[in-house]
């Protein structure tokens, strides 16, 4: 399941929802991304996105992860709008019988989301606002999954 | 044809979305960018470094050499920075 | 921090405790291990441990993870006693500025915990009880971290 | 010297812990195991496949060739299966 929302999310509630009524899950991995204040340089972060395409990309990524690993459940939640240091930005949850699939899939989802979901961060600090630059590391993290796939 | 702009592309063009009639002969995303640059100083500025601009046709990522075909909407934006 | 306890844990409460009063964290990874019913073959799981040594090993592993990755916070909670399908067994939480360290450290902790923390699972099903056998995969997962370390 | 047994080692020996006087000449963990096997059928059974038994001296994992030295407690158990 995927959701794009302004509201905050509750990790425990999301886990409880994934587990509800089933006892075949052995491993649950969650990733939560949060706003860092960067030693006072950031007072606010605004997330803009491309409504419609964001949901479409996240749905596509989730389907890819489910095709590649034996997941029993998965969830991606991404917030938009104006956030403050300490606030949650993104949540990925993966559940599987064994830990390897859950860890791999969660990391894959984050690496792909970072380079393909149409969201943009604008940071505001004491000296004004600026758009965050994409990190070359994120591109190479994504590329490493394509190499692993090719090697399989 | 609907054109959408996001993040600093939107800030520089000064608009989020518009409906345009593309000139005859404009067949690829790169050619749309080339035409947009001729539409005034804001557009020239927004698309100055065309190579860093990302594009999507009908909400799918595409490269600059992608053909527009029967696209309903084309979006232009900087490299994504979510997550 | 590490804890060995009979009581259940609450992932959201543990995350909230790690984040309390700080806004420098950018990435939080949690791993939750839960009891699988294995299609009805398991009705109960009992975890025996070596009191004193378990705490000692978990403390040692947590220190190793903190020496190897720039973690801002970490937590290991392991339950003991009798559990049922769907129940939580183990929780690992890692927090860092960036996602790579948090993912790597959480996985490292689970891989090492599986091969060095003195805990033993006994499964009970409709046909009686048996002690779970160690998995050779767990040994190789651990060994792979030693190879990565050697390669660094 | 305090000896501890866990999981199926405990089940087979029938005891969780005991205080023993080791015979002279028993200097390593492996030699303790060799001596334990002579203490009756339960111990012979528990330590039959000595190579799969893991040991800890004073709560630190050790190999069978580890010297006992001034150990206060030695524990014997199967490969661990927590997590």
Image (cartoon, coloured by chain):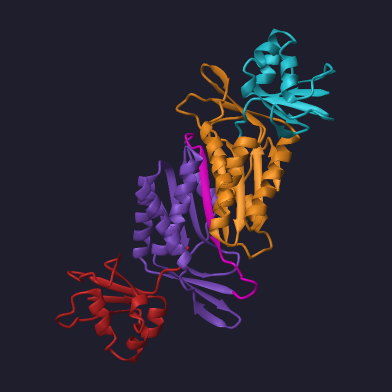
Chain colours: A purple, B red, C orange, D cyan
Residue A114 visible from this viewpoint = no
The answer to whether residue B11 is above or below residue A107 is below
**Horizontal and vertical percent position of residue A67:** 35, 46
Residue drawn 54% across the image and 52% down it: C103
Left or right: A12 as drawn, with respect to A2? right
The answer to whether residue C74 is above or below residue B8 is above
Left or right: C128 as drawn, with respect to A64? right
The answer to which image quadrant residue C28 occupies is bottom right
Left or right: C49 as drawn, with respect to A105? right
Q: Nearer the viewer, residue C91 or A84?
A: C91
**Horizontal and vertical percent position of residue B65:** 24, 71
Residue drawn 67% across the image and 25% down it: D77
Residue drawn 79% across the image and 28% down it: D68
Q: Nearer the viewer, residue B27 or A52?
A: B27
Q: Nearer the viewer, residue C8 or C150?
A: C150
Q: Of helix, strand and loop, which mostly describes the magenta segment?
A: loop
A31 is within the stretch colored magenta: yes
Residue C50 visible from this viewpoint = yes
Residue at the far top: name it. D41
Left or right: A8 as drawn, with respect to A39? left
The answer to whether residue C147 is above or below residue B83 is above
Residue at the far front: name it. D25
Residue at the far left: name it. B24
Q: Pick the quarter of the image with the C terminus of chain C.
A: bottom right
**Horizontal and vertical percent position of residue C24:** 63, 65
The answer to which image quadrant residue B74 occupies is bottom left
Magenta residues span A23-42
B39 is within the stretch colored magenta: no
The answer to whether residue B35 is above or below residue D21 is below
- Tally of marks: 0
**Horizontal and vertical percent position of residue C38:** 47, 28
């Amino acid at each position: 399941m995927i959701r794009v929302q302004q509201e905050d999310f509750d990790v425990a509630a999301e886990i409880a929802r994934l587990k509800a009524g089933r006892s075949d899950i052995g491993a649950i991995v969650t990733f939560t991304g949060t706003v860092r204040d960067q030693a006072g340089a950031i007072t606010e972060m605004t997330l803009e996105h491309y409504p419609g395409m964001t949901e479409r990309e996240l749905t596509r990524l989730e389907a890819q992860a489910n095709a590649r690993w034996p997941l029993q459940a998965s969830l991606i939640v991404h917030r938009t709008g104006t956030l403050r240091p300490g606030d949650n930005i993104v949540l990925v949850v993966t559940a599987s019988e064994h830990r390897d699939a859950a860890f791999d899939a969660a990391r894959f989802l984050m690496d792909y989301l970072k380079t393909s979901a149409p969201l943009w961060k604008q940071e505001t600090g004491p000296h004004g606002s600026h758009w965050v630059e994409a990190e070359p590391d994120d591109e190479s993290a994504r590329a490493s999954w394509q190499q692993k796939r090719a090697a399989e | 044809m609907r054109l959408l702009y996001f993040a600093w592309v939107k800030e520089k063009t000064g608009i989020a979305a518009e409906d345009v009639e593309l000139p005859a002969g404009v067949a690829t995303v790169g050619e749309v960018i080339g035409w947009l640059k001729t539409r005034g100083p804001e557009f020239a500025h927004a698309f100055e470094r065309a190579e860093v601009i990302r594009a999507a046709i009908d909400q799918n990522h595409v490269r600059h050499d992608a053909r527009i075909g029967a696209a309903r909407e084309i979006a232009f934006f900087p490299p994504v920075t979510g997550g």
